[in-house]
Image (cartoon, grey):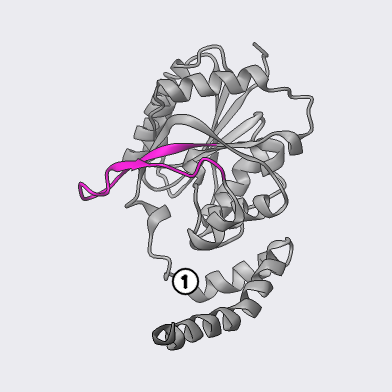
Amino acid sequence: MSKEIFFTIATCSKDNLSELLETCVSVRLFTLTLPDVKFEHILVLSGYENSDLCSLQKVVNNYENNVKVNIIYMEPRGISAAFNKALEEARGNYLIFLNAGDILTPDCDCIVAINEVMGCFDSKNEFSSQPVYYFDVITTGNTRLASRRVRYPSQLNLHHFLKMGNPINHQSTLYPLKLAQQYAYPNLYVGMDYFVNFSMKLNGLQFCKLSGILITYNITGVSAQSPFKGLLENVKTFISESTKHRLFGLIILCILLLPIRFLQAFIRKVTYPLR
């Protein structure tokens, strides 16, 4: 096994100690399942008191020797700034982003799949040839219906992004680090994952689904807030960031096709009795 750190786990959190500690405990248990793998855990934090940081330090002190811990404290500038800071500091081969409250709960299929990935990984390859890996997730919430397994598509194509929204999220995805560093997170209130994943797909990057469950994701958290919050600012930022990628051309195409789609739907509705 290579001595190089293989996985970077980046956790971003603002003043949420209890859920952050739960995430850290799950990170420790996850690294125990892969004792021969080198990890680093980057924690990008804001809004924490010194006493909170002391409690956090006690937990990470229990990590195994194969885990390097890097705690970064920064002024609150939004989750996208925290994610981008983690991207700058990361040194692993693959990266996973977590929010406080996300719990790593890998099953047997997931562990087998990760071991297979490690067996095929070659750090000398160009990062563009490394696929983005993703898993199914377990969601939890305030109701029984919220607690379920979310089965993501076995293969991702543009149809999933255009018609279904974002078909995967960062909690369930392993990004090749050098690749992820080419796609900084835009300053959006919601939809950061959508923008990054869609941009990658438009540029022909490969997404590969692996078997099993990696994470339990709380859908009542900050990542699941109403998409209408800051909608105008979201749209402005989305268009501004899109001009830097091929995504902008697709947005223009969708705008041009919208009247045509509306007219087609209207004609089908009017002519239906004549068929």
Q: Is residue 118 above or below residue 135?
A: above
User: Can residue 87 be seen in the rendering of this structure?
Assistant: yes
Hey, what amino acid is under mark 1?
Gly
Mark 1: give few (<14), some (14-19) or many (20+) Cα within 10 Å: few
Residue for badge 1: 230
Is 49 on the left or on the right of 257, as rendered? left
Residue drawn at the location 49% of the way across and 19% of the way down: 112
Is 95 on the left or on the right of 57, as rendered? right
Residue drawn at the location 62% of the way across and 45% of the way down: 85
Frontmost residue, 44 versus 193: 193
Residue drawn at the location 54% of the way across and 23% of the way down: 114
Q: Is residue 105 above or below residue 221?
A: above
Residue placed farthest to the front in the image? 275
* Quadrant in the rendering for residue 121: top right
Q: Is residue 58 above or below residue 74?
A: above
* Quadrant in the rendering for residue 147: top left
Q: Position of residue 83 (x, y in %)?
A: 57, 47
Q: Position of residue 93 (x, y in %)?
A: 66, 29
Q: Position of residue 105 (x, y in %)?
A: 38, 29
Residue drawn at the location 66% of the way across and 43% of the way down: 180
Q: Which residues are magenta?
A: 134-155
Q: Position of residue 184 (x, y in %)?
A: 66, 52
